[in-house]
Image (spheres, rainbow, N blue to C red):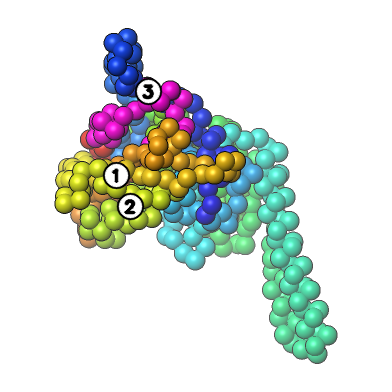
Amino acid sequence: MPLDAGLMKKWLRSGAIALCVGALAACVQASSRRLDALKDSWRTECVGYYTMELPGGVDYGAIAPKHMSPFVANWEFPVSLAPAWGMALAPDPGVRASDDYEKRRLYLSEKARPEDLEAIMSKINSRLEHEKQILLDEADRWVRRKDVEYAEQVRKNAEVIRFYKSVPGLQAIADDDGKVTHFYVLLGDQRIVQALRPSLASTAQTIQAFLQHYSPREPFAIPEGPGACLPHGFYRGESLPAFLGATFTLTDHPDIVINVTLSDAQGGTKEPREALLRLLRGHLADADEILPLDGRIKPSHTVTIDGQEGLGHFALVRRKVSPPGAKDPLDNTYTQDHSDSAYIAYAPGISGGKPGESFNIQVRVERFGRFAKEPVDQQMTEKQFREFAKRFVASIHRR
């Protein structure tokens, strides 16, 4: 899926870790003060069933209301770089994936208003109306060809297309076929949540039943009791462990982008080296060339995440050079070879255990120097990036 530079810039919008590398003593002293402040600002956040420490605030990827569609094709968030589109999590906790996997994921919007629900409904219904008209036109063509039986079959396919409707008593829109209900609901924290649930007696009852499990959550608010921490939310009482991926930037340091993916190890694990190769080959944004930072003979190192042993890998990422006026620039304009640092790690869980007993933990940390606000002589060095990534991974623990 192409990256949306406008949304990328919105999420990567202010500040970065300031590290002076100049020779002046005053610059070195200023850098030291900033690093000390960074070390003192780390707070505990939760993602899925784990807690982790982060400096300052976080900006989670969130889909803008105008883009909230069940057919947004961005299911593999590390590839599409979630701050561009804001993948929140997948799939809906407690619901197994199926052919309509996109609908079975929970999506979370940015701050929204009631009129955004109307805009979403109008957009989806316009597309459905267009699809229906195409089928009706096709049916007419088959009538003219004297194949009335097939024309009637096509016409029936058109007639079963349903449209989204407002839900009385709730700030919500939904499509309910009596078996499953796909809905968008605006909650008190001014965010729209999109989900698909088994249908109950009425659409309103289906949504209300979902809201008995789902509740808004502010970042760094750690709920008590079992459940899955979601970006800006919390889900209790899931019947199956959630497969969850969250991607975020650091509010004060938006050149740092972090992705954490957690999957139940009951369904199997990957060999760590194979997992790292998959991430290196396809999950680093706009990469033109990827070079190991720790040599080619033994480029990866052992890493332990919450007691699980895996592999970690530091890499130099040379991103594709963006021509002047390019719409989607991600390359680092502050380095001669347009390079950035990246760190990936994978620690497999215990395969074949009980549901939720153990999780495969995948971490991706990328730096996008283009979005740092500091002058080039005050930006994060490779050494400082290594220190940051190691501390972050070491802080991950089961909640």
In the rendered image, residue 132, in percent from the top left (x then y), is placed at 73, 67
Q: Are marks 2 and 3 in contact (CB under 8 Å)?
A: no
Residue type at mark 2 is Leu
Nearer the N terminus, badge 1 or badge 2? 2
Asked if residue 303 can be seen in this view, the reply is yes
Tag 2's secondary structure?
helix
Q: Secondary structure at mark 1?
A: strand
Within-10-Å neighbours for mark 2: few <14, some 14–19, many 20+: many
Left or right: 110 with respect to 388? right
Image coordinates of residue 329 in percent, x first then y, are 52, 42
Dot 1 amino acid type: Ala
Count neighbours of disc 3 (C-alpha within 10 A) and say few if under 14, some if 14 to 19, many if 20 or more.
some
Q: What residue occupies the far bottom of the structure in this picture?
A: 146
Please report the bounds of the magenta region as a residue range.
365-391
Q: How far apart are labels 2 and 3 at the CA level?
A: 28 Å
**Three-letter amino acid code of the residue under disc 3:** Asp
CA gap, disc 1 and disc 2: 9 Å
Q: Quick one: label 1 or label 3, which is nearer the N terminus?
A: 1
Instruction: Identify which residue is drawn at 32% across, 57% down.
Output: 278
Identify the residue shown where x is 61% and y is 47%.
Answer: 67
Lateral position of residue 252 relative to residue 148, left or right: left
Identify residue for label 1.
315
Tell me: 333 left or right of 297.
right
Q: Which residue is mark 2?
A: 280
Per the model, the C-alpha gap separating discs 1 and 3 is 21 Å
Name the foreground residue: 212 vs 248. 248
- 198 is higher (above) or lower (below) than 338: below
Q: Position of residue 9 (x, y in %)?
A: 53, 35
